[in-house]
Image (cartoon, rainbow, N blue to C red):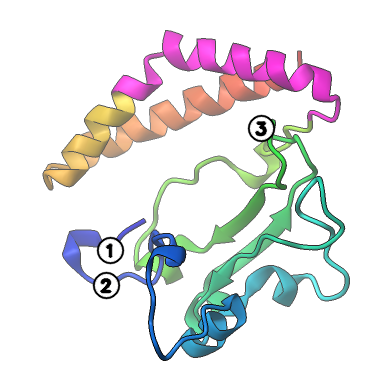
């Protein structure tokens, strides 16, 4: 998420830091976190032992760092079980931010927390789930609709109409993803 209307926003896409070199920085993640004053929000909300986040390892490799102000805006965090939402070798991390305190206004929820119950524990079913979900995304023309909405946002032509369309699309996506997950 980049800043709205070109203004600063604390939630940003971070470029791959491996491509940048700074003579005052030793290149370590710890130095970057300390230098920028960032907080490990997962460890803050879940003190104690955090599970390994990589299937071929026994330690935590993945983190979610936020600014101190965003610590106060964070409502919930979690690390999902392996293969919950996608077939990958890392655990998905979830962070729920209070949109009013984070962005200054209300935004549509991606999906209600209660609705995020997609729990595919059988790796054999993951591939079938992905194929069916992709078919549904194509059937409902989700990618085309998202492209149009993104274009409206980029051209500063986002209106209440597009907010309603976004809400409808979010509801459609949530419904078919949940129905596919329960099959």
Q: Nearer the viewer, mark 3 or mark 1?
A: 3
Give residue 89's quadrant in the image: top right
Give residue 124's quadrant in the image: top right
Please name the residue that numbered disc 3 is placed on: 86
| Mark 1–mark 2 CB contact (< 8 Å) | yes
Question: What residue is rendered at 51% in x and 64% in y?
Answer: 98
Question: What residue is rendered at 82% in x and 62% in y?
Answer: 59
Give residue 146's quadrant in the image: top left
Vertical side of 97 occupied by 177: above or below: above
Question: What residue is rendered at 67% in x and 34% in y?
Answer: 85
Which quadrant would the N terminus be assigned to in this image?
Answer: bottom left
Instruction: Give the alpha-carbon distance from disc 3 to disc 1, as whole Å.
Output: 28 Å
Relative depth, front residue between 115 and 91: 91
| In magenta segment, residue 69 | no
Q: Which region is colored magenta?
A: 120-144
Q: Is residue 9 left or right of residue 137?
A: left
Vertical side of 50 occupied by 138: above or below: above
SS label for mark 1: loop
Instruction: Give the alpha-carbon distance from disc 1 to disc 2, as whole Å.
Output: 5 Å
For the image shown, how many numbered marks are present on the structure? 3
Please name the residue that numbered disc 2 is placed on: 8
| In magenta segment, residue 122 | yes
């Amino acid at each position: 998420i980049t800043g709205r209307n070109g203004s600063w926003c604390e939630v940003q896409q971070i470029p791959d830091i491996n491509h940048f070199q700074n003579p005052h920085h030793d290149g370590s993640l710890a130095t970057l976190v300390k230098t920028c004053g960032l907080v490990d929000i997962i460890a803050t909300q879940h003190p104690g032992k955090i599970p390994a986040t990589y299937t071929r390892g026994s330690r935590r490799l993945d983190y979610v760092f936020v600014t101190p102000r965003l610590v106060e805006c964070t409502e919930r965090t979690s690390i999902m079980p392996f293969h919950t939402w996608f077939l990958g070798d890392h655990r998905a991390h979830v962070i729920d931010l209070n949109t009013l305190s984070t962005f200054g206004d209300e935004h549509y929820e991606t999906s209600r927390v209660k609705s995020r119950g997609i729990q595919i524990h059988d790796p054999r079913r993951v591939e079938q789930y992905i194929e069916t979900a992709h078919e549904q995304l194509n059937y409902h023309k989700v990618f085309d609709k998202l492209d149009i909405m993104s274009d409206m946002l980029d051209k500063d032509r986002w209106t209440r109409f597009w907010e309603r369309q976004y809400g409808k699309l979010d509801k459609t996506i949530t419904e078919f993803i949940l129905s596919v997950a329960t099959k």
